């Protein structure tokens, strides 16, 4: 088992065990579909690569539970619009 998954640091970084599980599953699916690793980690274990991506703040879940890469522009091309009329 990967030792980092036993620590609370990675759970707290992501926002809970459910979110951690979701992030890992979605990122593993992307890597299995051909996405490149975002970290230089000498291992063939894809799970270890995903854990390192999380620990190095390379990936995260957005508010709609989609995997986002840190520093990657939103597909809309800018910050989200706020609807101030409902305030």
Image (cartoon, grey):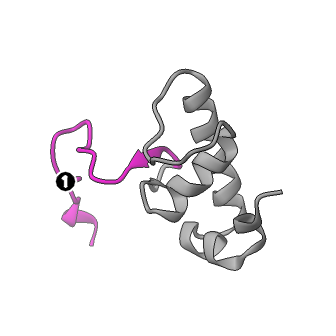
Task: Report crowding for label 1: few under 14, some 14 to 19, many 20 or more residues within 10 A (C-alpha).
Answer: few
Q: Classify residue 32 by image quadrant.
A: top right
Provide the residue designation for mark 1: 79
Q: Which residues are magenta?
A: 65-87
Residue with the most extreme front position: 42
Q: Is residue 64 visible?
A: yes
Residue with the most extreme right position: 1
Residue 27 percent across, percent down from the top left: 57, 40
Which SS type dominates the magenta stretch? loop
Compare residues 60 and 44 and report the one nearer the observer: 44
Which residue: 45% across, 48% down? 39
Q: Is residue 61 visible?
A: no
Residue with the most extreme left position: 78
Residue 66 percent across, percent down from the top left: 49, 44
Which quarter of the rendered picture does the N terminus lie within?
bottom right
Which residue: 76% across, 66% down? 3
Image height of 26 relative to 24, above or below = above
Compare residues 83 and 63 and report the one nearer the observer: 63
Q: Is residue 78 magenta?
A: yes
Q: How many numbered discs sit on the rendered protein?
A: 1
Q: Is residue 42 magenta?
A: no
Q: Classify residue 38 by image quadrant.
A: top left
Residue 80 percent across, percent down from the top left: 23, 53
Image height of 41 relative to 55, above or below = above
Residue 31 percent across, percent down from the top left: 56, 31
User: Relative to 73, is 27 on the left or the right?
Assistant: right
User: Relative to 30, is 86 on the left or the right?
Assistant: left
Which quarter of the rendered picture does the C terminus lie within?
bottom left
Which residue: 15% across, 47% down? 78
Query: SS at mark 1?
Result: loop
């Amino acid at each position: 088992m990967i030792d980092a998954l036993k620590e609370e640091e990675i759970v707290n970084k992501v926002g809970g065990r459910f979110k951690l599980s979701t992030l890992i599953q979605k990122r593993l699916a992307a890597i299995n579909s051909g996405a490149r690793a975002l970290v230089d980690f000498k291992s063939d274990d894809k799970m270890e690569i995903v854990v390192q991506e999380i620990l190095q703040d390379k990936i995260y879940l957005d508010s709609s539970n989609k995997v986002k890469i840190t520093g990657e522009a939103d597909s809309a091309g800018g910050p989200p619009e706020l609807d101030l009329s409902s305030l």
